[in-house]
Image: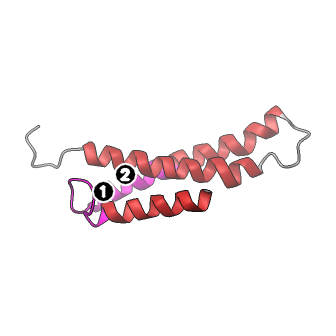
Amino acid sequence: MLGTLLLIGLALAVAYRYGLIGHRPTLDFAAQLRVALWAAGLGGLGFVLGFYGPLWLTPESNQGPLLGIFITGPLGLLAGIGWGLWRESRRGSPGDDA
């Protein structure tokens, strides 16, 4: 399931990058950096919450950190990529009169 979601997210990111979807043909370096920062931020937040949350809620569980490693971290990364791409698609280019 997670592998399928990762492949779909990767395919959408590549399609957006090469102008197959969205109104921008390519992302400049600054836009790519903003998307990467959103992905790293939300992925890191998902990892930290999923890793330390179960340790805090059920300290006797020995498999608590696996939630952050295998589920909430990658889902946060995908959410960050999606959020960053959505924000960049809504952002006007510098020459637009909006």
Question: Within the image, what quadrant is residue 70 found in?
Answer: bottom right
Residue 11: x %, y % from top left: 42, 64
Provide the residue designation for mark 1.
30
Residues at badges 1 and 2 in contact (C-beta under 8 Å)?
yes
Is residue 40 placed above or below 17 in the rendered structure?
A: above
Q: Is residue 42 left or right of residue 81?
A: right
Q: What secondary structure is marked by label 1?
A: helix
Provide the residue designation for mark 2.
34
Residue sitting nearer the eye, 7 or 89? 7
* Segment tinted magenta in the rendering: 17-40
Q: Is residue 96 left or right of residue 41?
A: left
Q: What secondary structure is marked by label 2?
A: helix
Residue at (64, 47) in percent of width and height = 72
| Amino acid type of the residue that numbered disc 1 sits on in the rendered structure | Ala
Q: In this view, does 72 lie to the left or right of 81?
A: right
Mark yes or no: residue 39 visible. yes
Residue 39: x %, y % from top left: 48, 51
